[in-house]
Amino acid sequence: MSPATTPTRLDLKKDEKLEITWQDGHHCVYTLTLLRSMCPCAHCRTIRQDEQPKKKPLLTILPGDYSAPITVLNANLVGNYALKIEWSDHHDSGIYSFEYLRSICPEEARGEPRGYRGSDK
């Protein structure tokens, strides 16, 4: 693994967010809603991909029960390369590799510089 995909700190708040500090100094904060909507399992990935080429619908329905706020019931490391999350909607087939988590980092999407820590809320 490269420094960009090697976490030095994982901090999961089961009803709020996941924060990861990477070995290269970058810091990412993922809301639980983002993580659940970007589940990397085959079923969720297929649903997201099927929606892309079509005209954007008014409402995209992803698998899961969003009638209550989404929370994490359990999370475990998978070897030294990923995180497996069990969601409050009982979906648990997604394995979030560290490489995948880095690729969906919200701070990267906003173009914040490496090492940027943002505000500590």
Image (cartoon, rainbow, N blue to C red):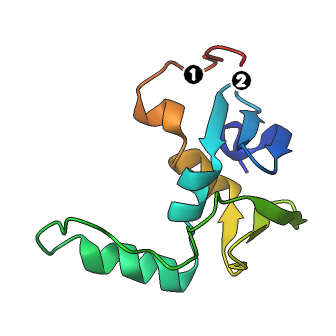
- Residue 85, by quadrant, is bottom right
| Quarter of the picture holding the C terminus | top right
In the rendered image, residue 118, in percent from the top left (x then y), is placed at 61, 16
Camera-side residue of 70 and 10: 70
**Is residue 65 in view?**
yes
In the rendered image, residue 72, in percent from the top left (x then y), is placed at 78, 60
Residue at the spot 74% in from the left edge and 37% down from the top edge: 19
Q: Which residue is mark 2?
A: 25
Residue at the spot 33% in from the left edge and 75% down from the top edge: 49
Disc 1 is placed on an element classified as loop
Amino acid type at circle 1 is Arg
Say few, some or many: other residues with alpha carbon within 10 Å of mark 1 (under 14 / 14 to 19 / 20 or more): some
Residue at the spot 86% in from the left edge and 60% down from the top edge: 80
Disc 2 is placed on an element classified as loop
Say few, some or many: other residues with alpha carbon within 10 Å of mark 2 (under 14 / 14 to 19 / 20 or more): some
Camera-side residue of 36 and 97: 36
Residue at the spot 44% in from the left edge and 74% down from the top edge: 62
Amino acid type at circle 2 is Gly
Q: Marks 2 and 1: CB-CB under 8 Å? A: yes
Q: Which residue is mark 1?
A: 114
